[in-house]
Amino acid sequence: MEDLVRLTAHEMAGPLRSGEVSSRELVEAHLAVAERQNHALNAWLSLDRDRALAEADAADARLGAAHAAGPEALAALHPLTGIPIALKDLVSVAGGQCTAGSRILEGYRAPYDAHVTERLRDIGAVILGKTNMDEFAMGSSTEHSAFGPTANPWALDRVPGGSSGGSAAAVAAFHVPVGIGTDTGGSIRQPAALCGIVGMKPTYGRVSRYGIVAFASSLDQIGPFARDTRDAAALLHAVAGRDARDSTSAPIPVPDALLRLPVSDDAAATALRGKRLGLPREYFVAGMEPGVEAAIRAAVEALTGAGAIVEDVSLPHTEYGLATYYIVAPAEASANLARYDGIRFGHAVRDGDVIGNYLRTRGSGFGAEVKRRIMLGTYALSAGYFDAYYLKAQKARTLIKGDFDALWGLGYDALIAPTSPSVAFRMGTRMADPVAMYLSDVCTLPVNMAGLPGVSIPCGLSEGLPVGLQLIGAPWSEAALFELARGYEGLTASAPWRSLEPAELRLADDPSMLTPAARAAALAGGAH
Amino acid sequence: MAGLSRTEVAHVAHLARLGLTDAELDLLEGQLNHILDQYAILARLDTSAIPPTAQTIELENILREDEVRPSLPTEAVLANAPERDGDYIVVPAILAGE
């Protein structure tokens, strides 16, 4: 049974179709590991065994019917039918919790399914539960969750990245083969890098956000996590495409090429020949860890060896990315989070009059980082400061996007860069300094500012911890990006680091292990 | 760009309808000013001839038919209300006095 969880979704698909294994068996096996390890990892905020098993039985009925109907019916099933999946706890599942990592949504029950939830139900994927996250997706470590931090399966003292750290840790720890996250400034790619898995932020507009808790609406995008590129691409295929209920979801066809990435490693690597890749020099930032830089340089060498043409390029406005992002995102957040007023749903505290109610409800319902961002955003939008901050940032955004457009105009197939300037950092080390935490996303947030797709794939280890390689593409080029990523994966298929499992995963099986919250407290105590 | 005083921090908190403790206001005064210092880099950019970007994909005038469709059941929506009276959400009085 335990061996089942080591399989990728595409490896599970054959035995599911032949009847050799049932979705129920797969779900039981994954639930057993997730339930056993969640004490030490806190990757999940909820696991719904009964619902998952009912969904698995329904998937088994579909698989059985298709099996009886013949090869055509089997081929028509989506690759993820019957496969267990994790959802970040900001995706609505009708009747279920949807906290967005916040006390202010504790007890709230989603009255309807998100678009991605509907899509996953349509194909018969099985939702095991909801995963931990930084409150309202604001953070880069999952330490800003109101429900305690998540531990990185590679090193339990370290963060999994964030904000989608719960989904990333759950996929890395074999609790599920695939998971859903959201990425506003790096919240899929950075935790994918820190947990040693694949994560993609698609083009802005690729996936409908109907039923997702909003953070910054001109930046938020939903995307997949998986342990390899084929599974990640299949999950994107399942959830992407136009939905009338999100007017920013684009009427652009979703390519079936996402389901046809090369199976053979050699064939995949061959596709790298002649590809023109830009290496933006500004992404090798001051303060980047030498081990991270070494792993990225080695990946560049491997790509060149496989026949790709790698050229130094410049994105000259990169240095303005952080300031621009930390004006635009908090400004949009301050408007989006005005809805948490304690009147229609969620946490509510009464204190005299209507203003008193707002102050007490919001003051006690939001955590420190969310308050900080609401304050920043409110200030940047307030009378007298709008031009100096928000309008200025929107203009800088034009320049940042223009940098990328110029390179697409020169015909680059993709850009390659580090995903994160550091490997997974120790819990607590960036909590006292918001700017240090914000710098975690310096290589990912320009991609959101420009609305582009970006994928992070594992490219080795530094000090025993995973390093992520980021591939950035032109709008709507997800399939081409995944082909490149699959090429690199094929090229490095026999690299020694590929076969390693998260180093401290076995420790998470020990029921006497500290919870991540207790671990963080112990680390903080030791620091004084 | 000038720094934020403690009074201004308190004013912004009120605008944002965030009830903050004195300790929170003290901490935020330092942290917000540190973050605002990072924003100063933008002053170096000449953006006088640059149009603003609000979002990145060129979609305009997304239209749909105006047709009657079922909405969420009242019970499902009201189930999350902190305080209700039948099919209504109870809200605090906005207009004071008689």
Image (cartoon, helix red, strand yellow):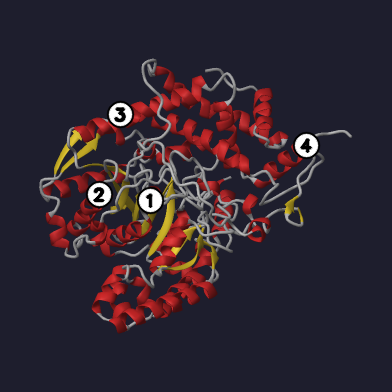
Which one is in front in this view, the residue at disc 3 or the one at disc 1?
Answer: 1
Q: Are marks 4 and 3 on the same chain?
A: no
Q: Are marks 3 and 1 on the same chain?
A: yes
Q: Residue at x 71, y 44 (%)?
A: A361
Q: Are marks 4 and 3 in contact (CB under 8 Å)?
A: no
Element type where label 2 sits in the image: helix
Query: Which residue matches tag 3?
Result: A402
**In this rendering, position of residue B77 left or right of residue A287:** right
Residue type for callout 3: Gly
Element type where label 4 sits in the image: loop
Q: Position of residue A434 (x, y in %)?
A: 52, 37
**Which of marks 1 and 3 precedes in the sequence?**
1
Mark number, residue A46: none
**In this rendering, position of residue A352 left or right of residue A150:** right
**In this rendering, position of residue A171 left or right of residue B1:** left
Tell me, yes or no, if residue A202 can be seen here. Answer: yes
Observer-nearest residue: B95 or A218? B95
Query: Which residue matches tag 4?
Result: B94
- How many C-alpha atoms fall within 10 Å of the one at disc 4: few (<14), some, or many (≥20)? few
Chain under disc 1: A
Residue type for callout 1: Arg
Query: Which residue matches tag 2?
Result: A481
Q: Position of residue A323 (x, y in %)?
A: 44, 29
Please, is residue A372 above or below residue A79 in the view?
above
Residue that sits furthest to the right in the current view:
B98
Chain under disc 3: A
Q: Are marks 3 and 1 in contact (CB under 8 Å)?
A: no
Observer-nearest residue: A445 or A143? A445
Chain under disc 4: B
Please, is residue B39 above or below residue A359 in the view?
above
